[in-house]
Amino acid sequence: MAAPLPTVSQQGSGVVPADLLNTYVQTVATFAQLRAFTGLTSMCVSVLGGAATNDGLGGLFVYSASSTAADNGATVIVPTGAIQGAWLKLAAPYSYQAPTTGFSIQVANGVTALLLNPAGTLASGTITFPTTPIDGQTLRIASSQIITALTLSAPAGQTILGPITTIAANGHASWQYVAAIQTWFSA
């Protein structure tokens, strides 16, 4: 079977070719629904939340029929009654940077972790949050070194509650975005 090309399928119109079977990303609301579904290797499911929609535990999961990992209620979800096989959460995108003093970093859309690894203590730097975050998106900022004067900047129309102004060596902070009010809450 060849890798399928992106295709639009419409109800009542034609037949789904064999190459497209099981290539569609399906959606479930919670881990309970995911546990009720045994997939085929490489099938993807978008999960909207762990116990409830938008509780921060959702994400994109891919099925591995050969997995023997135990269900951990977060990144490995095993179908009910399965002896082998599991839904494995795909890793969230991150950005790794080695900034110098006076840095300015624009966090790209979709990035959930900004990992800073400067050579030593930095006097200053600025981090601008993603321009088009999605509802419920988290952003974690971590640094291996001290940043003495840190400025967190929100794109136009957004607000950051609880912005940090410095970060300790091996320190971190995180925020979660609420789209309805365009605000990042300290998490």
Image: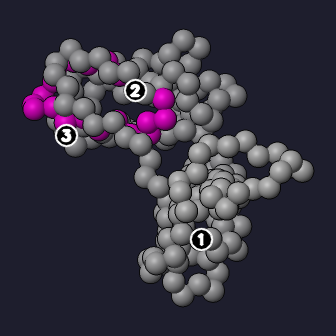
Q: Amino acid at mark 2?
A: Val
Quarter of the image where the N terminus is located: bottom right
SS class of the residue under badge 1? loop
Q: Position of residue 62 (x, y in %)?
A: 53, 61
Q: Marks 1/3: CA distance? A: 40 Å
SS class of the residue under badge 3? loop
Q: Can you name the residue that lies furthest to the left here?
A: 120
Q: Position of residue 22 (x, y in %)?
A: 65, 62
SS class of the residue under badge 2? loop
Choose the circle earlier in sequence order: 2 or 1.
1
Q: Residue at x 59, y 14 (%)?
A: 157
Q: Is residue 22 above or below residue 14?
A: below
Q: Amino acid at mark 3?
A: Ser
Q: Which residue is mark 3?
A: 144
Q: Residue at x 59, y 33 (%)?
A: 134
Q: Residue at x 44, y 47 (%)?
A: 92
Q: Which residue is mark 2?
A: 107
